[in-house]
Amino acid sequence: MILSIGWKNVWRNKTRSLVVIIALVLGIFGGVMTTGIMNGWIAQRVHDCIYIEVSHTQIHNPQFMLNEDIQYTVLNYDKVLHTLDTAKGVIAYSPRVKLFAMVQSDWAASGLVIRGIDPEKEKKVSEVYKRLIEGEYLGGNYKIPSIIIGSKAAESLKLLNYQVTAQKLDSIDKSLYPKTIIEKLKGIGDKRFRKDKDFKVALKETLEQKDFDKYADRLTKYFSFYRMNTSIRLTVQAKNGTIQNPVFKVRGIYKTSNLMYDGMNAFVDRKALNQFTGLSDSEVQEIAIISNDNETGIIAGEKLAKDFPENSVFTWRKLSPEIAMYTDFMWFIGYIYVGIFLFALAFGIINTMLMSVLERFKELGMLMAIGMNRVKIFAMIMLESVFLSLTGGVIGLLISGVATNMLSKSGINFSFWSEGLESIGFSSTIYPNVTFDNYLIVTLLVIITGMVASIWPARRALKLNPADALRNE
């Protein structure tokens, strides 16, 4: 009977109940989406960190971790490889030569970390080859060896240029730009610009201010191009201490979600690099290892650390402690945001239930006068609040489930903040990820919020004197 009365009381004032339910739906939607975006963001960052930057485990000479000198190579290399071939939890590994070099193009110079790799082995531990935006991966039989550099490094070396060519004008998407804009662009001519700000100055002088504000960024990106097959000279120290200046040709540009990584790392074939450094095939500064998953990687890394006490073996949690912190605490931060949403909703429920109690003083007094005890009055009001919370919660979770399922496939594009996000290693496209546990926890939080929020109105009802309530007009 209490259940029936509580449910009917919810719908006595439909407008007020619907307002609370809509507020609950919006709150749940916001909470679930916030949790999903947080999860997606962290999952993307952890994935990119492991499969592009650090791998699950790395092996180094202990001295290399103190002084990254070319002579500090992995100890007992052959024994290490033999063990890795049969080690449990090791899916793939890639030996790397890791050097610091000054890299010089015809227009600029920059310091880079040069990674000498075995291209096919590297593909099994790193997804850099999947992030090529121009050119080709390492390989091919070229007289001058190839080098792959990041998009940010290409900008530093002034290999990213801007030019309004007739070919690009002919192929421009005419549905995106007015005909007058395209005609005005011809006035810039085929002059080549080495900086985006110089190209934008030319655009500003050509276009009207309103057109410049609307199209400048898009046109700058469209008319940009990388100078592929450009020769760049490396200055590296050989094993015997001499300075070498090998020349490589830029045949690939990659772009990850981390601008700092793109600006610092370049890849060359290890055999080609060894011709200049004097290192043998069994001398590498780093061995990167990939396991089945993150947890297996930690277990396998700890086992390898015992197998190779003469070397330093670090798992991804030690190599990138900020990522370990994200995985440990970001779920908690996500629920803080959910808590803020629910805290605001609690006030709406308190207000609604309090008004409901105040409007029914006489009715509640009558129920007490005919024998309904205070416990049942308390339970009835609590149930009204729980029904409101559950109705709004179920609808909110259904809408949130459909929305997150769609967005987990298409992604949410935060391109407006792409530069800022990529500067700290986060992708500008987020794929929300909401687990069953997330839905379960949010549902429980909604019910708890509804029950807690109804305690104060219920206490007001318990303090009623039936005689006074019946005299109330």
Image (cartoon, grey):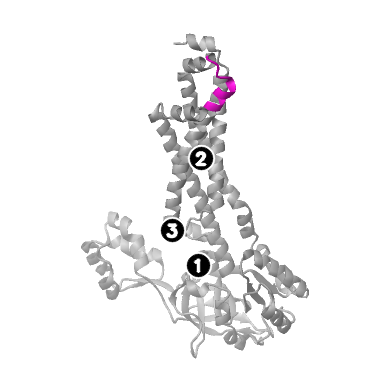
Residue drawn at x 53%, y 61% is: 44
Magenta stretch contains residue 470: no
Identify residue type, mark 3: Gly
Majority secondary structure of the magenta segment?
helix
When asked about the image quadrant of residue 241, the answer is: bottom right
Q: What are the residue bounds of the magenta stretch?
A: 370-380
- Label whose residue precedes the other's in the sequence (3 or 1): 1
Q: Position of residue 164 (x, y in %)?
A: 31, 71
Determine whether the residue tagged by mark 2 lies in a helix, strand or loop. helix
Type of the residue with mark 2: Phe
Which residue carries the number 1 mark? 256
Q: Position of residue 317 (x, y in %)?
A: 66, 62
Residue 340 seen by the camera: yes
- Report x, y in % for residue 141: 49, 90
Check residue 373 for magenta coloring.
yes
Name the residue rendered at 26%, 57% in the picture: 208
Indicate which disc residue 341 carries.
2
The C terminus sits in image quarter: top left
- Residue 80 occupies quadrant: bottom right
- Disc nearer the start of the sequence (3/2): 2
- Residue 25 image point, x, y percent: 44, 41
Please, is residue 139 above or below residue 364 in the view?
A: below
**Is the Cβ of the residue at disc 3 closer than 8 Å to that at disc 2?**
no
Which residue is the site of mark 3? 411
Q: Nearer the viewer, residue 25 or 373?
A: 373
Q: Crowding at label 3, few (<14), some or many (≥20) Cα neighbours within 10 Å?
A: some
Camera-nearest residue between 428 and 356: 356
Q: CA distance from mark 3 to mark 2?
A: 23 Å
Total marks in image:
3
Q: Earlier in the sequence, mark 1 or mark 2?
A: 1
Tag nearer the camera, 3 or 1 = 3
- What's the amino acid at mark 1? Thr
